Image: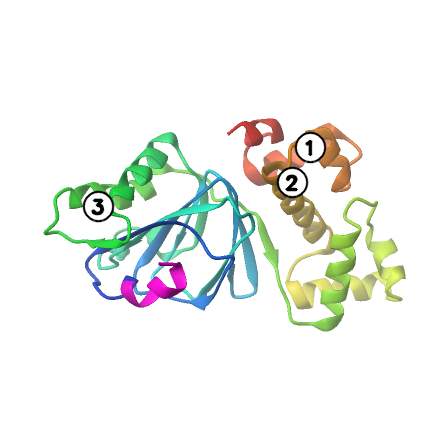
Amino acid sequence: MGLIASLPEINKQRNAVFVMHEKSEKLIPLHTHNKGQLSYVEGGIAYITISNRTYVVPARHYFWVPQGMPHILRIGHSATVLRSLYFYAHDDDSNAFYSQLGIYPASELLIQMINYSERWDGRHVTSQDDNFEFLVAIKKLLPELNNKALPIILPTTDDGQMLGIIRYMEKNIGERLTLAGVSKHFNLSERSMSRLFQSSLQISFLQYLKTLRMVKAIEMILKTSKPVSDIAYEVGYTSISSFSDAFHEFTHSRPTDFRKS
């Protein structure tokens, strides 16, 4: 049973934990559930869209979506396995962690604990079940991991002019894109282009470009075996060191270490 078909089942028992491990659908449209969602991304990449913001979730990272938060989930790689636990929400006010979306690198301990939960795949686990406390322990552990949330967020928009600019940047990501050059291509002044980014995306041109390059780099690192140096040039960097520094700023990991993990 896929995630879309499972949504009514997830919501059935409020005080239970629903467990689902699967190769997920490519796109799960806007939906919500009455439980908090912990999902570990194994072997690929996922994207969560909430309120015109798309969050990138690389392999070996997990995300938490609070109860009642509408979101779209897209899987960007056919090998992606989502290992998900949908937790009761009656104790969510015990820690601020549970009330906000977050994407974090998964520790080896958490990965092993989530993998162990596969024995309950496709069912609700309640306080009447043996080892229910094991799942409770996973939820309680999350705020204690002290991980830094990844700041890999791409804003989205319905503005037609802005969408044309975004498509142009994506197509030419390996080129030397500048505010002046892109503005000239679209017959806009630099000031008008800057205002358009701020009004449509609430982000500067340079920050959007930097984030877009990081998203494309992460996709290539996870989906291809290209050397890191080739990837750096393909997303527009002329220096391997500057690419590595930017990548570390976004992921808290060097590109070579990210691929190894």
Could you tell me the amino acid type at mark 1? Lys
Which residue has dot 2 on it?
220
- Give the mark nearer the N terminus: 1 vs 2: 2
- Identify the residue at horizontal 24%, vertical 54% (top origin): 123
Give, as a single range, the part of the protein colored magenta.
1-9
Q: Is residue 120 above or below residue 7?
A: above
Which residue has dot 1 on it?
226
Q: Residue furthest front?
A: 1
Q: CA distance from mark 3 to mark 2?
A: 36 Å
The residue carrying pointer 3 sits among few (fewer than 14), some (14 to 19) or many (20 or more) residues within 10 Å by Cα, namely some
The residue carrying pointer 2 sits among few (fewer than 14), some (14 to 19) or many (20 or more) residues within 10 Å by Cα, namely many
Q: Is residue 65 above or below residue 41?
A: below
Which residue has dot 3 on it?
136
The percent position of residue 180, horizontal first and vertical second, equals 86, 55
- Identify the residue at horizontal 46%, vertical 38% (top origin): 60
Q: Secondary structure at mark 3?
A: helix
